[in-house]
């Protein structure tokens, strides 16, 4: 039993940290500001521990697995939680006294996403999914005095419940064909099965996780929820929830349906094409920066799906690399959005007018992060796009890669519109923008990491090792 517990030590450590946050909030209510630092430090330490001493093996009868793929995703989730905890410190103090519950739910959501990435059983997969998403519903509506936040929470709850129902229906159809919930048993049973129920179940599962990763045409929730939710939670939603959805997409389709790779790869290619076109075209007319980043996230999901559609070790590994750098770049971008909105009271793109004069550091960080999201060399985003497009070309997806390249050029238009506001247009005010220490620290980590990924080899090697787990 102790050996099995050692395999899930990151989850146990995070659960203990969540309980500690809740108890400390009750015991020392006047020290609530320290809870964010505690969760950030704890998640950061766990992320380092996972990478330095990665767990390996199976636990609880094979329901959970620890391998290179799960280690990479767990480190990604923990890093995202640590950065979002830092972003929440000053922001949360201005909208709510319930800080302990906020950080507790954030930790529980991270725990659910970690379990989701490790699941080797249909029941554990659904348990991790619900723990990860149900905790996010109240967080999206946390700003009680803001009607848009309540609207975001309600929309996320309703559409999330529908997507979970669709996903569960698909899983039950797969179980009905296979007669077992374990991934190994399902894989063996499905190799000899070709019933219409199986095809329908796969379609429902793809639709359910299409919602989680905000891929078109299942992206309808993203713009409204991103705009209305508190900005730190929007940052977490945009990266951690998306990454978890891709982790399960890779696990389910590559792990359970190796004999049907042509069919599910074609489905992923169609989703990728729709996401690239819809996300980039819809982002252009946006005037709200959070809605623009929401549609940008749809387009970014399309790029990741190019690697998934490649149905190869390189494709899966480079998709993981893409998600890791996207986590850093997007959280950093939302950090700047948060600081600008707090100073100006606006989340419109025009609020960035003259930012280079009001805060040169913020403007320069945002410039680097947007250029990385746009795929400009030598930043991390360039290598991510290059890698997934290479994987697509190797598998003959020339047409999809061509669309990806063209839409990436299109994406530069709306990213550079923000740069134009910051560096070309004059400011409405010459008052300096303050940079609080915790948010500044999170932004520094994201910016430095994106620049450091100009040398992508260490992370690329880690990601390709994760890809070989699915395609030995």
Image (tube, helix red, strand yellow):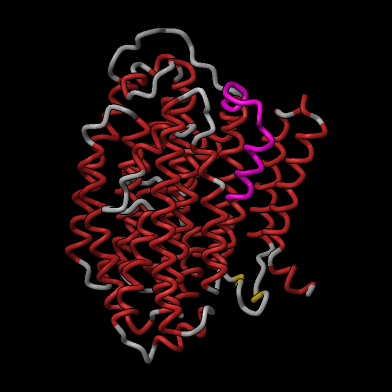
- Label tally: 0
Name the foreground residue: 356 vs 192: 192
Residue sitting at 59 percent across and 62 percent down? 115
Q: Position of residue 255 (x, y in %)?
A: 45, 77
Q: Position of residue 72 (x, y in %)?
A: 55, 61
Q: Kindly indicate the quadrant of the structure image that contains residue 249.
A: bottom left
Name the foreground residue: 378 vs 68: 68
Predominant secondary structure, magenta span: helix
Position above or below: 309 against 263: above
Q: Is residue 97 covered in magenta?
A: yes
Residue at the extreme right: 27
Residue 253 appears in the picture as rendered: yes
Residue at the extreme bottom: 192
Residue sitting at 66 percent across and 38 percent down? 101
Position above or below: 143 against 252: above
Residue sitting at 43 percent across and 71 percent down? 171
Q: Which residues are magenta?
A: 91-109
Q: Position of residue 1 (x, y in %)?
A: 78, 75
Name the foreground residue: 135 vs 4: 135
Q: Is residue 457 covered in magenta?
A: no
Taking the image as shown, residue 170 lies to the left or right of residue 104, namely left
Position above or below: 367 against 49: above
Taking the image as shown, residue 316 lies to the left or right of residue 419, namely right
Residue sitting at 56 percent across and 29 percent down? 440
Position above or below: 230 against 275: above
Q: Position of residue 224 (x, y in %)?
A: 35, 37
Q: Kindly indicate the quadrant of the structure image that contains residue 36.
A: top right
């Amino acid at each position: 039993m102790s050996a099995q517990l050692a395999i899930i030590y990151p989850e146990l450590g995070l659960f203990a940290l969540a309980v500690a946050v809740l108890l400390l909030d009750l015991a020392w209510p006047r020290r609530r500001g320290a809870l964010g630092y505690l969760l950030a430090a704890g998640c950061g330490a766990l992320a380092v521990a996972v990478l330095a001493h990665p767990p390996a093996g199976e636990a609880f009868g094979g329901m959970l697995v620890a391998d290179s793929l799960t280690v990479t995703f767990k480190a990604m989730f923990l890093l995202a939680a640590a950065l979002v905890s830092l972003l929440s410190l000053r922001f949360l103090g201005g909208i709510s006294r319930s800080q302990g519950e906020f950080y507790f739910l954030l930790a529980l959501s991270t725990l659910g996403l970690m379990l989701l990435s490790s699941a080797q059983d249909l029941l554990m997969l659904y348990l991790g999914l619900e723990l990860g998403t149900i905790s996010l519903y109240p967080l999206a509506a946390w700003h009680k005095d803001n009607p848009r936040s309540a609207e975001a929470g309600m929309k996320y709850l309703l559409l999330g419940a529908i997507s979970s129902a669709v996903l569960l229906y698909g899983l039950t159809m797969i179980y009905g064909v296979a007669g077992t919930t374990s991934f190994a048993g399902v894989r063996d049973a499905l190799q000899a099965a070709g019933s219409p129920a199986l095809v329908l179940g796969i379609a429902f599962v793809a639709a359910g996780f299409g919602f989680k990763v905000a891929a078109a045409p299942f992206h309808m929730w993203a713009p409204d929820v991103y705009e209305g939710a508190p900005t730190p939670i929007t940052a977490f939603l945009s990266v951690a929830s998306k990454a978890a959805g891709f982790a399960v997409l890779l696990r389910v389709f590559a792990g359970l349906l190796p004999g049907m790779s042509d069919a599910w790869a074609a489905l992923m290619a169609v989703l990728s094409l729709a996401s690239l076109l819809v996300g980039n075209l819809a982002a252009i007319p946006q005037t709200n920066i959070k809605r623009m980043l929401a549609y940008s996230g749809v387009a970014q999901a399309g790029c990741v799906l190019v690697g998934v559609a490649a149905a190869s070790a390189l494709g899966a590994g480079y998709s993981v690399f893409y998600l890791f750098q996207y986590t850093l770049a997007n959280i950093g971008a939302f950090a700047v959005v948060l600081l600008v909105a707090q100073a100006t009271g606006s989340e419109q793109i025009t609020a960035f007018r003259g930012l280079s004069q009001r805060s040169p550091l913020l403007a320069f960080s945002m410039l680097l992060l947007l250029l990385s999201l746009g795929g400009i060399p030598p930043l991390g985003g360039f290598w991510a796009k290059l890698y997934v497009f290479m994987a697509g070309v190797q598998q003959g997806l020339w047409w999809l890669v061509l669309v990806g390249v063209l839409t990436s050029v299109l994406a530069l238009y709306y990213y550079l519109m923000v740069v134009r506001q910051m560096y070309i247009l004059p400011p409405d005010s010459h008052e300096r923008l303050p940079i609080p220490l915790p948010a500044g620290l999170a932004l520094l980590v994201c910016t430095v990491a994106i620049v450091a990924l100009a040398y992508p080899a260490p992370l690329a090697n880690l990601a390709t090792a994760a890809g070989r787990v699915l395609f030995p």
